[in-house]
């Protein structure tokens, strides 16, 4: 025989919503449209690697709708033309330009950037830079062979690949570590160091205004803009 609940006892069924009852809505608030679904992390990384910074940045910003993420100092990078505050600086890139904008109020009002997504974007850019190195150095003759076949060059490319594989494995882990504080900053530093090492392999070609050096510079700026403030590290 089923036992009756004692007086004053609240059962789970008492709080269960009706199967077909509509969700309650606060008076005076219209239903909001669902936020756009963010791009998957591997897709963001792939776009950054194969298409470049601008398409990847647009993909990163899509998840934030009309309110782009600003860093703790009130700065962000947006594709040109950017609505809102006047740009602080313009950075021409292959396929278009991005602008650095500043709005101190936006840092408090807007959502922070997805830190894992930002790492994915920068990892894809470094992978694309390594691809560019392989193609460029394979086409440069040196002593009856190519620059790509030089032992020192192969060692540097292998080291860059090792760093990329380590970070990819970390991000692909079933339970990745909490990406905050000094650990987060260290990962971005590794990406910056790897990108700079690859640029040196390209020689003068790596530092042309419309070359890979410009993309690497804006990638570093993205990290500087969105990393937590000193007291939060």
Image (spheres, rainbow, N blue to C red):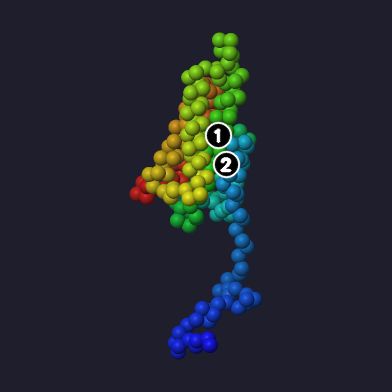
Residue at horizontal 60 percent and vertical 65 percent from the top: 32
Residue at horizontal 37 percent and vertical 50 percent from the top: 232
Q: Which residue is mark 2?
A: 45
Q: Quadrant of residue 121?
A: top right
Q: Name the secondary structure under disc 2.
A: helix
Residue at horizontal 48 percent and vertical 57 percent from the top: 109
Say if mark 1 contacts mark 2, CB within 8 Å: yes
Q: Name the secondary structure under disc 1.
A: helix
One can see residue 102 in this view:
no
Identify whether 201 is placed above or below 184. Answer: above
Given the current orientation, which residue lies at the most extreme top position?
143
The Cα atoms of the two marked residues, 1 and 2, are separated by 9 Å
Given the current orientation, which residue lies at the most extreme left position?
231
One can see residue 146 in this view:
yes
Q: Residues within 10 Å of mark 1 (few under 14, many from 20)?
A: many
The image shows residue 211 at horizontal and vertical percentages of 57, 28
Q: Nearer the viewer, residue 165 or 91?
A: 165
Residue at horizontal 50 percent and vertical 88 percent from the top: 4
Identify whether 33 is placed above or below 51. Answer: below
The image shows residue 117 at horizontal and vertical percentages of 53, 46
Q: Which residue is mark 1?
A: 127
Q: Earlier in the sequence, mark 1 or mark 2?
A: 2
The circle on residue 97 is: none
Given the current orientation, which residue lies at the most extreme bottom position?
7
């Amino acid at each position: 025989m089923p036992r009756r609940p004692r007086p004053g006892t609240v059962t789970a069924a008492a709080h269960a919503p009706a199967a077909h009852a509509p969700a309650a809505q606060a008076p005076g608030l219209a239903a909001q449209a669902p936020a756009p679904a963010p791009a998957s992390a591997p897709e963001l990384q792939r776009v950054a690697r194969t298409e470049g910074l601008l398409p990847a940045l647009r993909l990163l910003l899509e998840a934030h709708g009309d309110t782009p993420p600003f860093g703790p100092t009130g700065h962000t990078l947006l594709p040109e033309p950017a609505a809102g505050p006047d740009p602080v600086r313009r950075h021409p890139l292959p396929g278009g330009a991005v602008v650095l904008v500043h709005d101190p109020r936006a840092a408090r009002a807007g959502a922070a950037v997805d830190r894992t997504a930002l790492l994915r974007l920068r990892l894809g850019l470094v992978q694309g830079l390594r691809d560019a190195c392989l193609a460029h150095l394979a086409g440069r003759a040196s002593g009856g062979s190519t620059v790509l076949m030089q032992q020192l060059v192969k060692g540097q490319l292998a080291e860059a690949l090792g760093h990329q594989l380590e970070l990819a494995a970390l991000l692909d882990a079933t339970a990745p570590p909490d990406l905050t504080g000094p650990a987060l900053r260290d990962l971005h530093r590794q990406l910056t160091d790897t990108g700079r090492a690859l640029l040196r392999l390209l020689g003068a070609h790596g530092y042309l205004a419309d070359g890979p050096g410009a993309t690497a510079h804006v990638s570093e700026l993205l990290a500087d803009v969105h990393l937590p403030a000193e007291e939060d590290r």
